[in-house]
Amino acid sequence: MRRLSYRQALREAFDEELARDPMVMLMGEEVAQYNGAYKVTEGLWTKWGDKRVMDTPISEAGFIGMGVGASMLGVRPVMELMFWSFYTVAWDQIINNAGMVRYMSGGLINCPIVIRGPANSGTNVGATHSHTPESVIAQFPGMKCVVPATAYDAKGLMKAAIRDNDPVMFMENTLLYGEEWDVPDNSELPGGELVIPLGVADIKREGSDLTLVCHGRAVLTCLKAAEILQNEHGISAEVVDLRSIRPLDEETIFNSVRKTHRLICVDENKPFGSIGSQIAAMVQQHCFDDLDAPVLRVNSLDAPAFYSPPIEKIQNPTPEVVVARALEIC
Amino acid sequence: MSAPITSKPVKHADAAINKSLSVEKKRALYRDLCRIRRFEQISLKYYNAGKMGGFLHLYIGQEAVAVGCVSLMGENDHIITAYRDHGHALAVGMDMNACMAELFGKRTGCSKGKGGSMHYFAPDKNYWGGHGIVAGQTPLGTGLAFGLKYKGLKGAAMAFLGDGAVNQGSFHESLNLAALFELPIVFIIENNGYSMGTSQKRSSAYPSCLAERAVGYGMAWKQLNGEDLYEVRAGVHDALERARNEHKPMLLEISTYRYQGHSVADANKFKYRTKEEVERYEREHDPVGIFKAHLLRDGTLDEAAATAIDQAAITEAEAAAQFATQSAFPEPAEIFDDVYWEVDQKTESGQTGRHFFND
């Protein structure tokens, strides 16, 4: 099995989808001639040219709205936000136009778009560049939201996102772009390509005593925590990677909780209305009799992102914090 | 004081685009003006009778802009506008029954009762709304032009906005993108003088007019008089041809006037402007009256024919109100339709994972 970085896996997904469908095109700030601010789109402009891989000015409301409008005519734009944090200046286009035009038109219109880019804190760039908007986005029916943790998932989910006929908000992570994972070559796959459906969670580590539900980089945090829990405390933690926030694979969560009877939701959202809050609400309702302990959440500490590197490091969930919380209920 | 409507000359009757109009086509233009006027007057009656929710932004007084522009649309031309959208909808040929039923919140409405007055759409007629957020539709219009160019189709987009929208960032971003990427789009400011209750002078900084802002983007611009249907057609035709043939955008500012308030709920409609001002426009600048007078003069219509067209519009609008009254409200189960394409189509994607979170 070959090793591929998260960014290479995304690039492969774009390259394959650009080849598959002439309506697919990439646009965003510095995605073409600059090769991508984070080099995710490196080489694609050289290969595909101006029409398919297009630089835009720094004008998020303008070019996101333009992509939404073009999608109504059947173009399938994949639009990069250099940071997902910049969603704030394109909010009306994303929510009111991409997210609601189908509903308000009584189903006459759909927007097959992907908006993508890194959505993480932890890189010492201050609060304005450190948003994790998946919980905010998932608030809106009409939206789909995907947050892959590995290169394998990033490639397969991106291909599904591009093929989806609803607006998909695809959240990557600058701290994961360089991480390498096993990603099969298409020749090794039965169907000849890697497509992972939205709405299917993945059990990244099996366990029997405790369920850790997580997504994005928090999956890596939980895998480390699970290792510590096993090695130092003899506690077997199951790590459920949501991969897709909306649609959400509730069955995998419920089945895991019914097996382990304990749940901690770990994500890098702020706690109020986090993804973990939603899951806690669902689990207490549907798995009440299966629970042996209160559902806990581990989130980013509830203040804007701190700049100072050593402080920001502890603002996000760490394996140590997850272990400590686990020991409270195991 | 301007000339009364009956003696007001129509300019540009000799422009090729107008001179080539057949008698039947000229009558159809008049019919379109009357249908919009009567539809809105009758919708106002039912609004005041409590048959509708929310807002009702009426287009009365501005009809020649939508009718003139839409009359120029070809197969690959597309339009999009803001919330004062009934005129454009009827001009592109949307069904009056469905438009009225939407106001009544009925399932037979053009958006199945999900959009209301501000959110009419007819993609099959190249009409993309009907948008509630001021200037929010301008990037979408830019995208329609982008889509045309991307697909190699010869056509143009028209993005309508009010004079109150020119100060929104999304509009300026749209102008920049359209000029930068050489997109086939005509931005049309329907300047009725007031952004809600704030006059143009109190809301915008400008050199000689709003359209001149195009200069900052290296874009051509022009002012047109919206009371004169032929002037609208002549000016917009040139802009559309330029967009279609040269992929050059243009910013047009068409002066017009709304007789009603910003919406029917505009409690101050005679506070930020005088009753005399409104009456003067109705008397001297009414686009329906001016065009009718022209058609009477050039022999396209006589009084009896004009009255018959207008009467038919009243009858049609009243029938639409009856249709809307008799239609059923949507079922509660319809709340979850039309949220996700994949769910509606029952695709594998639409049936994988949970999409709705009600319990």
Image (cartoon, coloured by chain):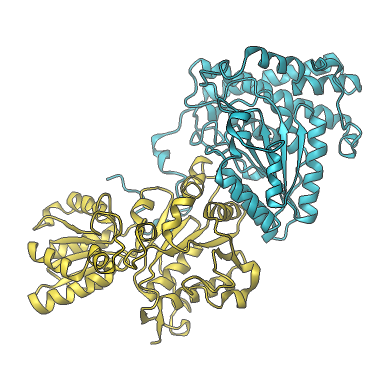
Chain colours: A yellow, B cyan
Please determine whether, in this image, residue B46 is positioned above or below residue B193. above
Q: Which corner quadrant of the image does residue A149 belong to?
A: bottom left
Residue in the image at 39% along x and 78% along y: A178
Residue A18 is drawn in which quadrant? Answer: bottom right
| Residue B74 placement, left or right of B168 | right
Q: Residue furthest bottom?
A: A1
Q: A125 or B77: nearer the eye?
A: A125
The answer to whether residue A221 is visible is: yes
Q: Is residue A99 above or below residue A39?
A: above
Residue A150 on image: x %, y %: 35, 74
Judge from the rendering whether residue A68 lies leftward or rightward of residue B301; answer left or right. Answer: left
For residue A292, side relative to residue B329 (left or right): left
Q: Is the C terminus of chain A in the top left, top right, bottom left or bottom right quadrant?
A: bottom left
Query: Which residue corresponds to the image point at 53% horizontal and 19% vertical from the top-left?
Result: B47
Locate residue B195 relative to residue B67 in the image: left or right: left
For the question of whether residue B347 can be seen, the reply is no
What quarter of the picture does the N terminus of chain A occupy? bottom left
* Number of numbered discs overlaid on the protein picture: 0
Residue B260 x/y as whole percent = 61, 20
* Position in image of residue B66 (x %, y %): 70, 33
- A15 above or below A105? below
Location of residue B269 with respect to A50 vertically, above or below = above
